[in-house]
Amino acid sequence: MFRLLCLLTVLGCGCPLDSGMLFPRETSSREVKELNGLWKFRADMSPNRNQGFERAWYKARLEESGPVVDMPVPASYNDITQDSSLRDFIGWVWYEREVLVPARWVAGDGTRLVLRVGSAHYRSVVVMLLYTTPEHISMTSPW
């Protein structure tokens, strides 16, 4: 299993690039995995807005660091909830999503993987952690 953890700051509006990467299209030689949908979300409400980095929230599931909410992506978190402290929040916010990808993408055969992040703030951090699921041998039990 491929675990993706995105950390994004929201200190201002992301500006569109005048030039850059074209939007990827599925072809006979390219597979595309959309990451739109619900992500785990948490704003770093600590006084210095740096607790997530100090306590290394990226080393475990985000929900182990404290309360999280499901947040749709793409969307502006400032406009999703009724919480005024979140609507007016400036600082680091954390998004996390686990994604299953085909084994051939991580087989180590030189396959090139590209993560395209759209509309992120100019000061953003992306952490990708790769996990493989343990082998399970059984014809009857789920896992």
Image (cartoon, rainbow, N blue to C red):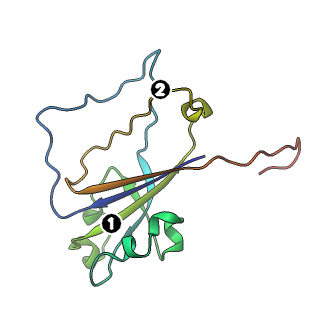
Q: Quadrant of residue 23?
A: top left
Specify few, some or many for label 2: CA neighbours under 10 Å numbering under 14, 14-19, or 20 or more. few
Secondary structure beneath disc 1? strand
Say whether residue 81 is left or right of residue 10.
Answer: right
Residue under numbered circle 1: 93
What is the CA distance from the residue labelled 2 to the residue labelled 1? 29 Å
The kind of residue on which mark 1 rests is Val
* Residue situated furthest left in the rendering: 18
Looking at the image, which residue is at 13% across and 47% down? 15
* Residue situated furthest bottom in the rendering: 47
Looking at this view, is 91 or 41 the one in front? 91
x and y, in percent, of residue 129 in the image:
51, 52
Residue under numbered circle 2: 31
Q: Quadrant of residue 83?
A: bottom left
Looking at the image, which residue is at 60% across and 32% down? 107
Q: Is residue 113 above or below residue 30?
A: below
